[in-house]
Every structure is written in structure tokens, then in C-alpha cells.
Image (cartoon, grey):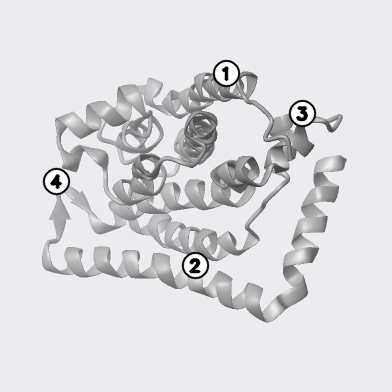
Amino acid sequence: MLYKRYLSMLLKSQLQYKASFVMTAIGQFLVSFTTFLSMYFMFDRFSQVEGFTFSEVLLCFSVVLMAFSFTECFARGFDVFPRLIRTGELDRILVRPRSVVFQVLTSTMEFTRFGRFLQAVLVLCYAIPASGVNWTGDKIITLIAMFLGGCAVFAGLFILYAGFSFFTIDGLEFMNIFTDGSREFGKYPLVIYGEGVLKLLTYVIPIALFQYYPFLYLIGRTENRWMMVLPLVGFVFLLPCYGFFRLGLSRYQSTGS
């Protein structure tokens, strides 16, 4: 499979400098670890936030961080897409007999992001037994759906970010509010930020659909089984994001380089 070949090639190239690779991965781990420490010290002072305990909040934190880190690793090409336009590399992509999306995905992969992903897995391993959740089959499915839905939403945001690059030449920094910002907001159940933010992250950017609402079902605060499938809306969110990217691509004019 061609994708596996690209994957292997990029991994081997990044491992050519093993010390740099390891130190960067450790750096990614430590940067996210400071976020975990800030949460720990806050809950050491206040035992609950909006009625949510520390171990329950860690479920939110770990799922969002896992989804973001995994997506950032494999969809990094869209995150750095403006560079392809500035350097004229996109022109070369357009004349190759492969889809643009496939080539952008395989243009850049940041395997050092697994340092951050590893921390999320470790936090999740702690939160699963500590949260007090009765892990029946439907709860396990909900947790998996939250991760997959999160990956879809973050991938959609990266694609949307790339789409704006066709109209602005350079990336728009406000999109970081929804990419990096979503990772930060996702540390806690979104309801703590107020009704306005919760509505925005439900109906405009569907972060709450994979983070907050299925989380309520996970910890037993609602019996509505529809919450289990809400994370799958993240895959529907990909459609307009991809459509916007295709719109920008159809209006792209070659740099002539």
C-alpha cells in the first residue's frame, strides 16, 4: 500500500537523527505534562469543578489530548499547507497522478507528537479505574467513539485551515482558537465555560459532540443512549470542511514557479 510506504519513509527520515527525535518527543510530553500539573494543583485546592471530580475531568482531558495528538501527527500536512502554496510545492502536487488530499497528508507527518499522545494514554489508564465508571460494553464503545469523533473534528479543522490559505495566501491565526484552543478548552467539561461557549462548540464547531455530551453518558449523568453516537457527527463535519477546501483549490492560480 502506497500510504504505508510513505509512512515508513517519513518515519525513517525522522529517525536519522535519533537523539533529536527522542528529545523532541520528550519535550512534547513535558509541555503537555505542565497542563496536567496545573489541573492537579487546582483540584488539590478545589475538590470539584461544576460538580465534576478530578478523575472524571481527566477522562475529558485524556480523550481530547489523544485525539488532537493523533490527528496532528497524521494530518500535519494540512496544518502547514500555507507553506506548500508559498514555496510553489502545490504546483508539483497538482500535476502528479494522485489525489491532492493524499499527497498533502503524506507530505508531512510529525511522529514526535507521540510524546504527547503517550501522556494522554497514561492519563487515560489512570482515569479509567479512578473515575468510578461502570465500564460496560456501551461505555467502552462510547469512549472509542469519542476518540474517533475527536480525530474527525480536528482533521476537519486542519482542512478548513488549509482551505482559508487559498484566499489569504498565509494561514489565519484565529484558526488556532479552534485547533490549539479546542485542546485547551477540552481539559474540562465544556459546560464550565458558560452556555454561550457551549452552544458555539456544539452548533458551529462540534467539539462538544465528542467531548461533553458523550462524557455525560459515560459518567452516568444521563441515560440518553443517543449520546453514544453524537461523536460520529464529527465525520459529517468533515464534509463541509472538505467542500470548502475543494472550493479554494478550484480557484487556485499557479505561482508560475
Disc 3 residue type (three-letter): Ser
Residue at 14% over, 46% down: 50
Q: Is 124 above or below relative to 243?
A: below
Badge 3: residue crowd in 10 Å (few <14, some 14–19, many ≥20): few
Q: Is 123 above or below relative to 212?
A: below
Residue farthest to the bottom?
19
Q: Which residue is mark 1?
A: 247
Residue at 12% over, 62% down: 46
Check contact, mark 1 vs mark 2: CB within 8 A: no
Q: Is 252 above or below relative to 58?
A: above
Residue at 82% over, 57% down: 9
Disc 4 residue type (three-letter): Glu
Q: Position of residue 206 (x, y in %)?
A: 38, 28
Residue 50's disc is 4
Q: Position of residue 1 (x, y in %)?
A: 87, 40
- Mark nearer the N terminus (3 vs 2): 2
Residue 28's disc is 2
Decide which of 3, 87 is in the foreground and name it.
87
Check contact, mark 3 vs mark 1: CB within 8 A: no
Circle nearer the viewer, 4 or 2: 2
Decide which of 25, 254 is in the foreground and name it.
254
Check contact, mark 4 vs mark 2: CB within 8 A: no
Disc 1 residue type (three-letter): Leu
Name the image quarter holding residue 35: bottom left
